[in-house]
Amino acid sequence: MTRLLLSLAAAVLVANTALADDIRTERVEFHKGASSATVEGQVSGYDSVDYVLGAREGQSMNVSMATDNTSNYFNIIPPGKADEAIFVGSISGNQFEGTLPASGDYKIRVYLMRNAARRDETANYRLEMIIN
């Protein structure tokens, strides 16, 4: 049953991001001594943004997003993976808190669900990332 749920979550992730017209990548740098960073942005249609940040295995990560579009979500993709998420926002909401399973660069992929993307909707968002 767990394997089936993981397969379904992976299929949802691929369905939501495979049609992306453009995945813009931005590196997130925390200010010296800070454990958090906040970015504001916008996505439209099938475009997505990957926010990349480095972290170590065992650290705690907290990511939350405020948005003006109910079809705007984020996924968290661990180091070494292309489209296999450890968190899928369209299933779990726009709040993640957990312990990281590996060291390396994590991608926080912000996107619109297909229903909104096909109507070429736009979403404005504010993404807060905390690593301890």
Image (cartoon, rainbow, N blue to C red):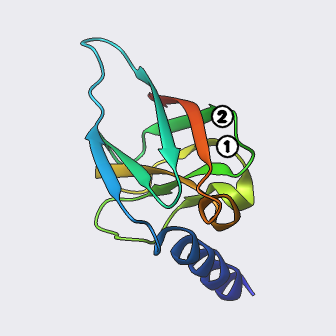
Q: Is residue 25 above or below residue 77?
A: above
What residue is shown with label 1? Answer: 94
- Asked whether 29 or 121 is in front, the reply is 121
The disc label shown at residue 67, or none:
2
Question: How many callouts does the rendering have?
Answer: 2
Q: Is residue 48 visible?
A: yes
Query: Counting other residues with Cα less than 10 Å from the Cα at mark 1, is it few (<14), some (14-19), or many (20 or more)?
Result: some
- Asked whether 3 or 83 is in front, the reply is 83
Are circles 1 and 2 on residues that touch, CB within 8 Å? Answer: yes
Side (left or right) of 82 relative to 89: left
Q: What amino acid type is highlighted by mark number 2?
A: Thr
The disc label shown at residue 50, or none:
none
Side (left or right) of 31 relative to 87: left
Quarter of the image with the C terminus in it:
top left
- Asked whether 36 or 23 is in front, the reply is 23
Q: Position of residue 85 (x, y in %)?
A: 50, 65
Query: Counting other residues with Cα less than 10 Å from the Cα at mark 2, is it few (<14), some (14-19), or many (20 or more)?
Result: some
Helix, strand or loop status at disc 2: strand
